[in-house]
Image (tube, rainbow, N blue to C red):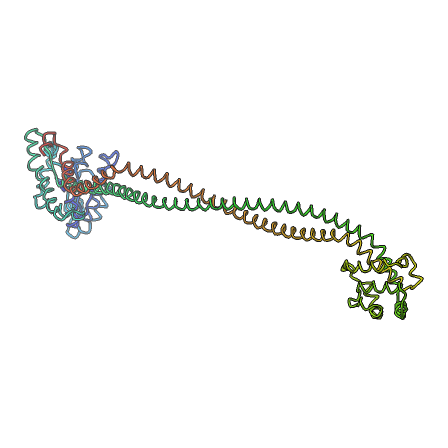
Amino acid sequence: IGGSGKQSLTKIATYLAGYKLFEIVLSRGYGDDQLREDLKNLYTMAIKQPMSFLFTDAHVVEEGFLEYINNILTVGMVPALFGDDEKEPLLSAVRQKAKAEGVLETGLWAFACGVIRDNLHLILAMSPAGNQLRTRCRNFPGMVAGCTIDWFFSWPNQALYAVAEHLLGGITLPEENKKGINDTMAYVHLSVTQHFSPDFEAKYKRRNFATPKNYLDFIANYMKLLDANRKNLENMSGRLGGGLDKLVQAAQQVTDMSVELEEKKAIVDENAEKVRALIEDINEKTVVATKRQEEANAAAEQIEKDSVIIEREKADADEALQAALPALEAAARALDDLDKASITEIKSFATPPQAVMAVCMCICILKPLGKEDESGGWTGAKAMLSDVGLLKALQEYKKDEMKERQIKKIREILNHKDKEVFEGDKMKTISKAGYGLLQWVLAMVKYYEVAKTVEPKRRQVAELQKQKEEAEENLRRINQQLKELADSLEQLTTDEAEQSATLKQLKEEADTMTRRLFAASELIEGLGSERGRWTNDLQDLGEVTTRLVGDCLLCAAFVSYAGPFNHEFRTDM
C-alpha cells in the first residue's frame, strides 16, 4: 500500500541513526547481473560504514531478486557474490581490526562478513495488499524469520487535524472557517477508512486502502482547486468589473461628447455667420468697385474727349493769334530801331506835330509804365517820354491786359480827319521815332482785335483744361479707391477662403462626432440589459467566492477518495 510513509520513515531513521541510505536504481534491461553489481557496491560500502538498504516492491523486477534478499536476511552474505580476486578490498578494510582482535588470516573472510552484517540494516518496504506478500513469505522464509515487522496504524483525528492545520496555514482562508475546514478534512478521511471502505469490502468483497498519502493528496487537491478557482473567479470578476467600468466610461464619454458636439455646433454656426458676413461684404464691395470702375472708365473717356477738344480749340486760337504776329514783330523791330536819341528828339518838341502828339497820347492811354496821365496832354506825354524805362516797358508790355475802352479811345484818335498820316510810311516823314511808336500802337490794336476774337476760345480752353485737370484728379482718386477696394477684396477673399476651409473642417469634425455619438448611443443602449446582467453576475461571483472554500473542499474530497467506489457508494458519500 503506497502512501503509508514506509520510505519516508526509513529515510528519517537512517539519518537519525547516522547510517547512509542505499537503493538500487532501476533502468532499462535491469536484471540479475546489475543487481549483483549493486550488491557488491553495497557490501563494499558496508564494510567501511553503517548502511541502510531499502528494498521495495518496485525493485522486484524478477522474483529471483528475492533469493538474494533471503540470503542477506539469513546468512548476511550472498553466496558466491565475490570471487577470490574480488575479496581483497573487503579483507584489506578489516585486516587491522581483525588482527587486533586476534583473528587469524584463515578466518578473515568470516570476520569481514560479520562486520558487514553488523553494519548493514535491510528494510523491506512492501505492500500487504493481495496475496503476493503472503506467497513471497512462504517461498522465502527469511523474510519472516529474519525481519521485524513495523505496524503502521491509521492516523487519528488529532493527527489529521494537525497536518491539515499545518499545511493549510500558508493559504488565505476566512478565520471563521479554518477550524471547520480542518475538522471536515479529518472527518472525510476517517469516514472513508472507518465507514465506507469496510462497508464496501463487506458488500462487494473489494478492499480499498486510504493511506496518509491519500490524505496529503486530498489537502494538495484542495489547495490546487481553491487556488485555480480563485484565480478563475478573480479573472472573471476583473473582466466583468472592467466591462462595467468601460460601460460607465463610455456613458460618460457619450455625455462629454454630446457637450463637445453642442460646443462644436455653436462654433460651426459662428463661423458660418462670419463666412456669410464676409461673402456679403465681398459682394457689396464688388458692386462698389464695379460702379467706381464704370465711373473711372467714363471719366477716362471724357478726359480723352476733352483733350481732343482742348487740342482743337487751342490750335484754332494759336492759328488766329498767328495773324497778329507780323504786326507784333514789326512793332518789335520798330522798337529795336528806337534809342534814347530818338525819344529825346520827340521830347524836345515844344509843340509836337499833331500826328506825333496823337501817337504819344495813344501810348499814354495804354500806360506801359502804369503811371501815365492821359489827361495831362503833351506835358503828361513828355513826362512819359522822359522815363528811362519806357522802351523796356514797351517791349515787355502786358498786351493781354488791354481793355476795350483803351482800344476805343485809340481808334478815335487814329480815325481823326488826318488819319491818312497813320497809314504806310508817311509817319516816317514826320518823325522816325514817332513812326516806331506808331507801329507799336498799331500792333497792340491789331493784337487786341485778334485776341478779342481768340479770347472766348482761350477761356474755353482754360475752362476745359481746368475741367480736365479736375477730371484727372477725380480719376486718380477713383483709381486709388479702386486699388484700395481691390486690396480689400483680395484680403476678404483670402479670409473667406480660410474661414470656408475652417468651416468645412469643423463641419466634417461635427459630422464625424455626430456619427460616433449615434453609434456610441446605440451601443450603450444595446448593452443596457448586459450592464444589468453583468452587475448581477458580479454580485453572484462575490457570493461564489465566499462559498468557494467549502465548494472546493467537497470537490477535492470527492476527487481524492471517490475513485475506487461505485455509483452507489459515491451517491452515499
Q: Nearer the viewer, residue 297 or 237?
A: 297
Q: Is residue 420 above or below residue 344?
A: above
Residue 238, how many percent across, how many down? 25, 43
- Residue 124 seen: no
Q: Toward which corner of the image does residue 83 lie, by quadrant?
A: top left
What number of labels is visible? 0
Going by the picture, which residue comes out furthest to the top? 204
Residue 464 in sight in this render: yes
Please tell me which residue lies in front, 485 or 314.
Answer: 314
Q: Eyeballing the image, is 36 above or below 448?
A: above
Q: Is residue 502 left or right of residue 560?
A: right
Looking at the image, which is closer to me, 483 or 391? 391
Q: Residue furthest right?
A: 429
What's the residue at 6%, 36% (across, down)?
A: 195
From the viewer's perspective, tell me whether residue 329 is left or right of residue 73. right
Q: Where is residue 70 shown, x and y percent of the image?
A: 14, 37
Residue drawn at point x = 15 percent, y = 51 percent: 101
Q: Position of residue 295 (x, y in %)?
A: 61, 46
Which quarter of the figure has residue 155?
top left
Residue 408 rendering spot, x and y as whole percentages: 80, 58
Q: Nearer the viewer, residue 274 or 129?
A: 274
Residue lying furthest front in this view? 417
Which quadrant would the N terminus be assigned to in this image?
A: top left
Quarter of the image with the C terminus is: top left
